[in-house]
Image (cartoon, coloured by chain):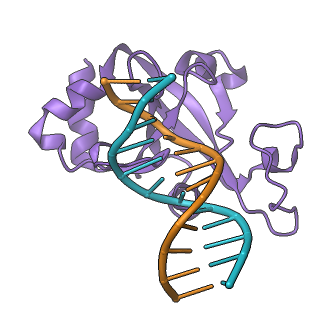
Chain colours: A purple, B cyan, C orange
Amino acid sequence: MRYWLMKSEPDVFSITDLENSPHQTAPWEGVRNYQARNFIRDQMRSGDRAYFYHSSCTTPGIAGIMEITRDAYPDDSAWDPDSPYYDPKSRAAAPRWYMVDVRWLLTFERIVTLTELRRHPKLESMTLLRRGNRLSVMPVGAKEWRFIEKLAV
DNA sequence: GCCAACGTTGGC
DNA sequence: GCCAACGTTGGC
C-alpha cells in the first residue's frame, strides 16, 4: 500500500464535501499536470491511503484521510465543454487525463497546518515542503505518514 | 492582490 | 531544440 497527499481548494471541494458525498466517495477529477497524472495513472492503486490537503485557503494544511477505492480511469471532465477542467486535446480514443475514486475515512480534529509541518525536522524532505513544489498529487513516505498521523491526534 | 516558482506554448 | 512570453499554483 502506498501513501499520498492530494490537494484541493476547500472552496471548490473540501473534505466535508467528500464526507457528504454519496457513499462518502467521489471521483478526484481535474488533475491537469503530467507529473501528477503519472502518479495517479501509474502508481496509485485501490487501497492506497491519501491525506486530503486544503490549499489556497485561510489555513492551508492536512484535513484528514481518504482511501483510494478505484484504480485510475479516464477523467471525463476533460471532455465536458462546460467543465472548468475541459481540455479539447484530450479525446476519448486517447485520454490525456486520469482520475481515481476516493472515499472519506476520517477528518482530523484540527487541521495539521502547513506552518506546523514546516516546523518538524523529520518532515523537511517531504515533497510537499520542497521549495517551489506545485504538485497537486504527490507520494508521502511511510515514516512521514505515521509521523503526521500522530500530530493529528 | 502580490509574486516566486514552475509548467506550457509557440515562433524560430 | 531553444527560449521568451505567458499562464498557473498557491502561500502570504
Q: Quadrant of residue B6?
A: bottom left
Query: Between residues B5 and A4, which one lies in front from this camera angle?
Result: B5
Query: Between residues A26 and B3, which one lies in front from this camera angle?
Result: B3
Instruction: Say left or right for A97 vs A65.
Output: right
Whole-percent x, y for residue A28 in the image = 64, 39
Query: Between residues A23 and A72, which one lies in front from this camera angle?
Result: A72
Query: Between residues B1 and A69, which one lies in front from this camera angle?
Result: B1
Query: Taking A135 as reference, is B2 above or below it?
Result: above
Q: Quarter holding the C terminus of chain A?
A: top left
Query: Taking A22 as reference, is B4 above or below it?
Result: below
Instruction: Say left or right for A99 vs A136.
Output: right
Residue A62 shows up from this direction? yes
The count of marks equals 0
At 68% from the left and 24% from the top, the residue drawn is: A23
Whole-percent x, y for residue C10 in the image = 44, 35
Instruction: Say left or right for A29 vs C10.
Output: right
* Residue projecting furthest to the left: A121
Q: Quadrant of residue A24?
A: top right
Query: Taking A107 as reference, is A37 above or below it?
Result: below
